[in-house]
Image (cartoon, grey):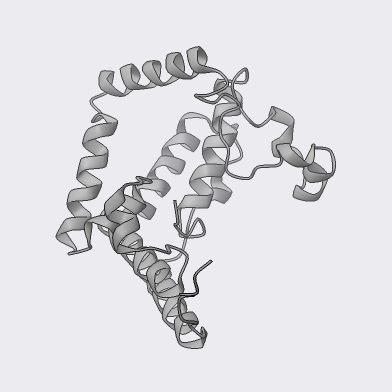
């Protein structure tokens, strides 16, 4: 999956989830409760190299812990339904539909969803090439803006702080205007593209 993790609020949302899951589900959390009080340097120094991961939320995986993995996500689906949230499938379809409304190609929409299929590989043989990455990133920004993702994230942080004032999470709030933030990313992408020397595909046979 090729997306810009630095696009707000993605990194902060992942950090928030890592912290809260370590409190609510310590037995399956990737982070230890004490990790939140460590500096990044200290955490890396005291952790096995292969175990350092800045995005992982859970310690369990579908491959290594199939029963626990299934039980966890079944429970989350049940809880989501009980409070009126849509299913994951509906959420994915809504995301794809919004991508279609912005006239993104299906391969770009499915790439943002983390899907891999022949239509993607056929149309975009190298998803790491600058111009293709730029298209994916800009499509991602459009969808994040339309969903008002930053505003929703700030609401989540404020509501969580209201319910659990003992948690130190106010630093997660994003104070700049979303439009200003996303426009700066769009300009940065354009600037990087202009400075990037694009090399032709290697067509030599082996």
Q: Residue at x 55, y 31 (%)?
A: 20
Q: Is residue 54 left or right of residue 62?
A: right
Is residue 94 visible from the viewing direction of this image? Answer: yes
Is residue 144 visible from the viewing direction of this image? Answer: no
Q: Is residue 148 left or right of residue 156?
A: left
Q: Determine the residue located farthest toward the left in the rendered image.
A: 101
Name the one closer to the observer, 152 or 81.
81
Q: Residue at x 35, y 47 (%)?
A: 152
Q: Residue at x 71, y 41 (%)?
A: 52
Name the one closer to the observer, 32 or 50.
50
Q: Residue at x 41, y 40 (%)?
A: 156
Q: Residue 199, image x and y in percent? A: 50, 82
Would you place residue 117 above or below residue 144 in this image? above
Q: Residue 85, image x and y in percent? A: 26, 29
Would you place residue 194 above or below residue 184 in this image? below
Q: Residue 23, image x and y in percent? A: 60, 25
Would you place residue 138 above or below residue 162 in this image? below
Q: Quadrant of residue 169?
A: top right
Q: Residue 195, image x and y in percent? A: 51, 87
**Number of numbered markers:** 0
């Amino acid at each position: 999956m090729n997306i810009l993790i630095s696009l707000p609020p993605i990194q902060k949302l992942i950090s928030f989830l890592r912290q809260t899951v370590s409190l609510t589900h310590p037995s399956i959390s990737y982070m230890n409760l004490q990790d939140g009080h460590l500096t990044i340097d200290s955490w890396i120094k005291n952790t096995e190299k292969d175990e350092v991961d800045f995005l992982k939320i859970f310690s369990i995986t579908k491959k290594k812990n199939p029963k626990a993995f299934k039980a966890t996500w079944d429970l989350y689906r049940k809880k989501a339904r009980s409070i009126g949230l849509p299913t994951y499938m509906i959420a994915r379809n809504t995301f794809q539909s919004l991508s279609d409304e912005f006239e993104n190609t299906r391969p770009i929409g499915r790439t943002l969803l983390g899907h891999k299929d022949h239509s993607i590989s056929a149309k975009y043989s190298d998803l790491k090439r600058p111009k293709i990455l730029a298209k994916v990133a800009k499509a991602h920004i459009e969808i994040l803006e339309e969903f008002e993702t930053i505003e929703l994230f700030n609401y989540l942080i404020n509501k969580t702080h209201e319910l659990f004032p003992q948690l130190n999470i106010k630093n997660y709030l994003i104070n700049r205007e979303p439009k200003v933030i996303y426009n700066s990313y769009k300009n940065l992408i354009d600037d990087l593209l202009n400075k990037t020397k694009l090399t032709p595909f290697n067509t030599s046979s082996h």
